[in-house]
Amino acid sequence: MCDSDSTANVIAGNKLESLGDIQQLQHCQSLVTLDLSSNRLSQEDAVHLIMTLPLSLLKLNGNPVVSHMR
């Protein structure tokens, strides 16, 4: 999902739905920007995993989880 030196990753519009679909991101500790917009993420656990990353910019718009967490 990312290489160890990657600082930006765009995974938009890929129909990702669950924590399992993005779990490999936990190994991407050099990421600063992450675009997961327009997927199907609906589990709050997925957001909790993402929040462990040292991100400066995160795009989650277009995912059901966004409306659940407001």
Image (tube, helix red, strand yellow):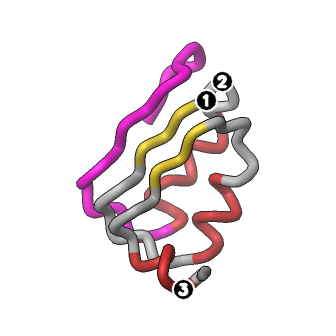
Q: Which residue is denoted by mark 3 in the rendering? A: 68
Residue at image point 43% right, 70% down = 41
Percent x, y of residue 5: 57, 14
Q: Residue furthest bottom?
A: 68
Cα–Cα span, label 1 and label 3: 25 Å
Cα–Cα span, label 2 and label 3: 28 Å
Three-letter code for the amino acid on which mark 2 is drawn: Ser
Q: Residues within 10 Å of mark 3 (few under 14, many from 20)?
A: few
Q: Earlier in the sequence, mark 1 or mark 3?
A: 1
Dot 1: what SS? loop
- Quadrant of residue 26 within the rendered picture: top right
Percent x, y of residue 61: 40, 62
Q: Is residue 66 left or right of residue 44?
A: left
Q: Which mark is residue 32?
A: 1
Q: Is residue 17 magenta?
A: yes
Q: Are marks 1 and 3 in contact (CB under 8 Å)?
A: no
Three-letter code for the amino acid on which mark 3 is drawn: His
Q: Which mark is residue 64?
A: none
Quadrant occupied by the C terminus:
bottom right
Mark 2 or 3, which is nearer the eye? 3
Q: Is residue 7 magenta?
A: yes
Q: Which residue is denoted by mark 2 in the rendering? A: 30
Dot 3: what SS? helix
Q: Are marks 1 and 2 in contact (CB under 8 Å)?
A: yes
Percent x, y of residue 54: 73, 36
Q: Is residue 34 left or right of residue 54?
A: left
The boundaries of the magenta stretch are: 1-18
